[in-house]
Amino acid sequence: MATKLRIKSHWFKADRPKTPEQTASAMAFISWRVALNMLKRMRDAGFDIDAGPAYFGFVREVLVFLLAGTDRIAYARLGADARVPFTTALVLRVAEILRENEADLLGPAGLPGGGDDYRDLFIDQFNELSGHYADFDWTEAEGPDFAFTRYLGSRLEAVVPAKDRRWVIDQVMAIEAPEAVAMLQRAMQDVFSTEAPGKRRAAMTGE
């Protein structure tokens, strides 16, 4: 049985409101961890995603999916005005995390098409694909709809070797995406709360 990933999601002093930028920084780190965990689980399931460009291609696709969902929940929780600085800060921070890791492991040779910067590569990818995901639905109560998750699976087909492509959509839709979404939404519940963890547990259990 695979070990469950535990993600720290309590960094702030209780009962104090967080700025959109603070919340975005926390969610950027969490999204990065969730994406890496999904990659590990896919490898454990037998998908040959090699270290190198394919590794980061997979991670970028999952991150766009997670950030698109996070943006939907932020809109519902924060409102339209606060959602814009939150999502902007979130995407920029994730882009920085990717740049740090891709530059360290791949160097400039890993940039496709002679691009200039891994950070800009991710921002461009998010801008393009967020428009595609806008056609689908994701709510905090229900998570992503069928089409939202299937689109992620279809995007990942191009990242894995040809021998694995016929299995990607089923694996993502049935197992990996639900696990990643559950982790993301639990973390968002914690990060967006202003109550101390102990107070939340007491309220939930009636203690």
Image (spheres, rainbow, N blue to C red):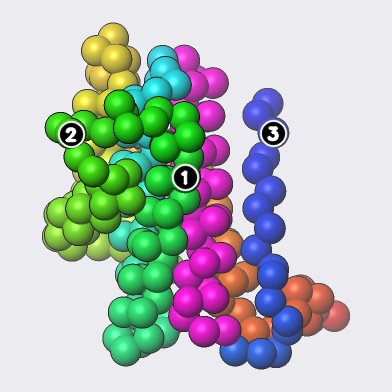
What range is drawn magenta here? Answer: 18-47
Q: Secondary structure at mark 2?
A: helix
Q: Residue at x 81, y 76 (%)?
A: 198
Q: Is residue 50 magenta?
A: no
Q: Quadrant of the C terminus?
A: bottom right
Left or right: where does residue 17 sit relative to residue 135? right
Q: Nearer the viewer, mark 2 or mark 3?
A: 2
Magenta region, mostly helix, strand or loop?
A: helix
Which residue in the structure is indicated by mark 3? 3
Q: Nearer the viewer, mark 3 or mark 1?
A: 1
Q: Quadrant of the N terminus?
A: top right
Q: Which is nearer the eye, 65 or 28?
A: 28
Mark yes or no: residue 125 visible.
Answer: yes
Q: Position of residue 3 (x, y in %)?
A: 69, 33
Mark 2: few/some/many CA within 10 Å (<14, 14-19, 20+): few
Q: Position of residue 165 (x, y in %)?
A: 26, 19
- The image quarter containing residue 140 is bottom left
Q: Which is nearer the eye, 38 or 118?
A: 118
Q: Residue at x 75, y 74 (%)?
A: 197
Amino acid carrying label 2: it is Gly
Which residue in the structure is indicated by mark 1? 100
Q: Position of residue 49 (x, y in %)?
A: 40, 20
Amino acid carrying label 1: it is Glu
Marking on residue 196: none
Tell me if residue 90 comes above or below residue 205 in the rendering: above
Amino acid carrying label 3: it is Thr
Q: Which is nearer the eye, 134 or 26?
A: 26
Q: CA distance from mark 2 to mark 3?
A: 39 Å
Q: Position of residue 27 (x, y in %)?
A: 51, 63
Which residue in the structure is indicated by mark 2? 114
